[in-house]
Amino acid sequence: MNEIFDKLLIRVLFTIFICVGLLLYKYAHVLFYPSQKKQIFKKVYPSENYVDTMHIFSRLIGIALIFSTLEFNEHIGFVKSALDFFILGASGIVLYLLSLYILDNIVFYNFEYKDEVLKKKNAAYGVVSFSLSICLAFLVRTIFQESERSLIILIILWLFVLVLFGFSTKLYQYVSKLPFNSLMIQKNLGLSFSYSGFLFGSALIIMAAFHHEHHDLASYSVQVILKTLLGILIFPIFRKGVIYVFQIKEGPQTGEQTEIPHLGYGVYEGSVFLMCALLTSIIIGQIHFGTIYPFF
Amino acid sequence: MNMNKALLYCALLLAYLGLSKSLSPSEFGISYVFNEESLSKLITGAPVSVILIDTHSTGFIIKTYYQKYKVVYGFQTYEEIIVRTSGTFNAKHAKHIGMSIFRRTESLEESFTPLPPGSVFIGNRDFGRWKTDHGDKVWQFYRAYRYVPQYIGFENFTPTQNFYRQIQKSLREDKAFYGFNDEFGTSGSVTRKQFPDYFKKETHDEINLKKYFADFLKRNFYRK
């Protein structure tokens, strides 16, 4: 019975630690958005500002996603495993929040959280911000799994993934016909769906590129770059294929205008980006050729 | 705009191919042998005999061919090397598994006629001598070179003087010699015994659909 209580106690302690991690985000929010100090410490009324609700809870979902990859193994020793859990958990939150800070500044370099979320209640900003948080959480989760509990490798891979993802967000203008800045100002939901699909697609391709065997960091990084490059080459083939097969007339002005301009086109673009990225990830991540060495 | 995109795509494609070629781990340390001359450049030292012991091809549409050689030197131990070869060169030597496809004598004379392994050492007075056995003259390596027959795969095969003469004749005529009873080469009895790796490999090129579906049904629906 003692053993059962002990195990339950350990689980409760870890639950408290994860809650402390969520609390950490509350204070981190103040650091990232200092002008909104009062707002985060106030009670949250989700129904008052759904854009802000999306913004905050997307980050909490992201933190939960990162924590979901952590493991505690008592058989390697309680103290060692607990320290591993705490250090990796804390590093995960810090890296995730730093990623959010950097990517927010890259993607929304023309927009302010305070203006778009609190004043204008810009739904497009909320949707894109939600997608960005989830994508970053998945990417940080992937590098956690690939770093095999090494903090040094984790930091190197984090920098690497951040560069790749940051660079990919800038490629949107080359693959979409929707202008990001002007439609974002107009709170266009079509743009938000299109950009979200693009973000999820990019994250999927990068995750597939990071997922392979590694013996040393240099050759691993080379393989990641090659796979990402391959993804960039394969992705347009799928996209062209879909457009050709379904005879899609591209262009935001084609067809009848709806109540929300470009909504249909944005949904189409977002869906195609996501679908093509998923198919591309099969090509770059799930086709294995082996080596000649088993034969000789 | 479309032209720019096409150019950008081509540039990315070239960058991918170039990076893959220069950074791929499978390209490191593997020489390319596309003809006899490149094989001669690859192999240094003399006397030496290069025995083809295995071949392998990868790829579905565009094949890449590999050959494995056992390089037996006169005055040092042997080494095994893997090279990438051209399709033509590989096809040319398809029947020569277990045979010497290149040799260089001490006087640096080179020849590429497919011959039984280690022919360069047979009849060379530095390595052995002819002795009479049941009326036949057979080749025997000196004690210092007693491992050579093992290296070249001659453990139970004793070359006779007739065998040696036929080797010399084949060399002059540049005609492959598989032994009087076809002991050497891909279907040779000595080769099968001495270089079994090539024959052990399972070939993936042929598939028996009936067997495949029977196995599939058995795996998925048959319960013990």
Image (spheres, rainbow, N blue to C red):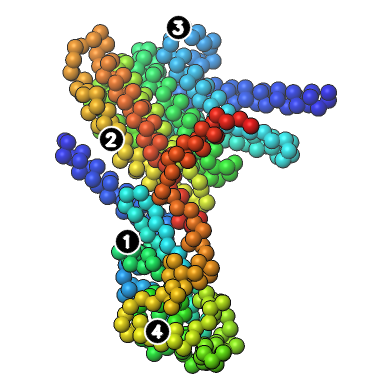
Q: Secondary structure at mark 3?
A: loop
Mark closest to the chain's N terminus, 4 or 1: 1
A39 relative position to B173: left or right: right
The residue that disc 4 covers is: B166
Residue A66 horizontal/vertical position (percent): 54, 29
Amino acid type of the residue tagged 3 in the rendering: Glu
Q: At 28% from the left edge and 15% from the top edge, which residue is drawn?
A: A263
What is the CA distance from the residue labelled 4 to the residue labelled 1? 30 Å
Amino acid type of the residue tagged 4 in the rendering: Gln
Q: Are marks 2 and 4 on the same chain?
A: no
Residue mark closest to the camera, 4 vs 3:
4
- The quarter of the image holding the N terminus of chain B is top left
Checking the image for residue A48, the label placed there is 3
The residue that disc 1 covers is: B87
Is residue B53 or residue A183 the one in the foreground?
Answer: B53
Is the C-beta separation of discs 1 and 3 under 8 Å?
no
The crowd level at tag 2 (other Cα within 10 Å; few <14, some 14-19, many 20+) is some
Q: Report in which chain the residue with disc 1 lies.
A: B
Q: Report in which chain the residue with disc 2 lies.
A: A
Q: At 32% from the left edge and 16% from the top edge, which residue is drawn?
A: A189
The crowd level at tag 1 (other Cα within 10 Å; few <14, some 14-19, many 20+) is some
Q: Secondary structure at mark 1?
A: helix
Is the C-beta separation of discs 2 and 4 under 8 Å?
no
Checking the image for residue A236, the label placed there is 2
Residue mark closest to the camera, 4 vs 1:
4
The crowd level at tag 4 (other Cα within 10 Å; few <14, some 14-19, many 20+) is some
Q: Secondary structure at mark 4?
A: helix
Q: Report in which chain the residue with disc 4 lies.
A: B
